[in-house]
Image (cartoon, helix red, strand yellow):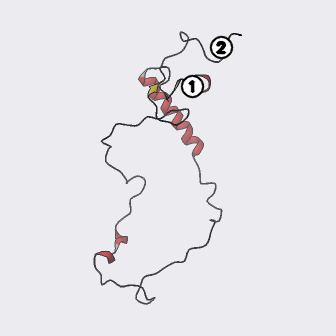
Amino acid sequence: MGEKKASGRVPEPSQRRVLDGAARQRRLCRQLEALERDNFGDDPQAGLPRPGKRLPHFADTAETGGANLGGGFLCQNLSTAEPPNYVSACAAPSKLPQRHFCAVCGFPSAYTCVTCGARYCSSRCLGTHQDTRCLKWTV
């Protein structure tokens, strides 16, 4: 049988760069900024008509025959309270540990790349990560 050819894209383990925590954080910030620049702008589908039927508008008032519950708890004027938005909505921190997912396939991961800190779940995903993804975002 013939010998298995090694990938020319993956450097030898002794030649790989290993990033420290600060370098990983800077790299992550650069990636996020690049995504923000790429996604900046208006929604391209904002001007398109919405599919489906138009929904009827219902008004529950005495003139239209709607129910009037006498001003109880259910009939409070909730329009005075400002609804939560993206900035003001928040939840308490989770009591469970953070979940980690594979950067290649999305399954739960138990391992971390020593070079860049990306998560992977199996040796097959590690091979894919090293061949195509590891430190490819660095400028």
Pointer 1: residues within 10 angstroms few (<14), some, or many (20+)?
Answer: few
Q: Residue at x 38, y 59 (%)?
A: 84
- On the rendered image, what quadrant is the C terminus found in? top right
At which x and y percent is residue 96? 32, 40
Q: Secondary structure at mark 1?
A: helix
At which x and y percent is residue 115? 50, 20
Q: Residue at x 52, y 16 (%)?
A: 17
Pointer 2: residues within 10 angstroms few (<14), some, or many (20+)?
Answer: few
Q: Residue at x 54, y 77 (%)?
A: 56
Q: Which residue is mark 2?
A: 6
- Left or right of 57 in this view: 94: left
Whether tag 2 and tag 1 are in contact, CB under 8 A, the answer is no
- Left or right of 16 in this view: 2: right
Foreground of the two, 132 or 33: 132
Amino acid under disc 1 = Arg
**On residue 124, which mark appears?**
1
Q: CA distance from mark 2 to mark 1?
A: 15 Å
Q: Secondary structure at mark 2?
A: loop
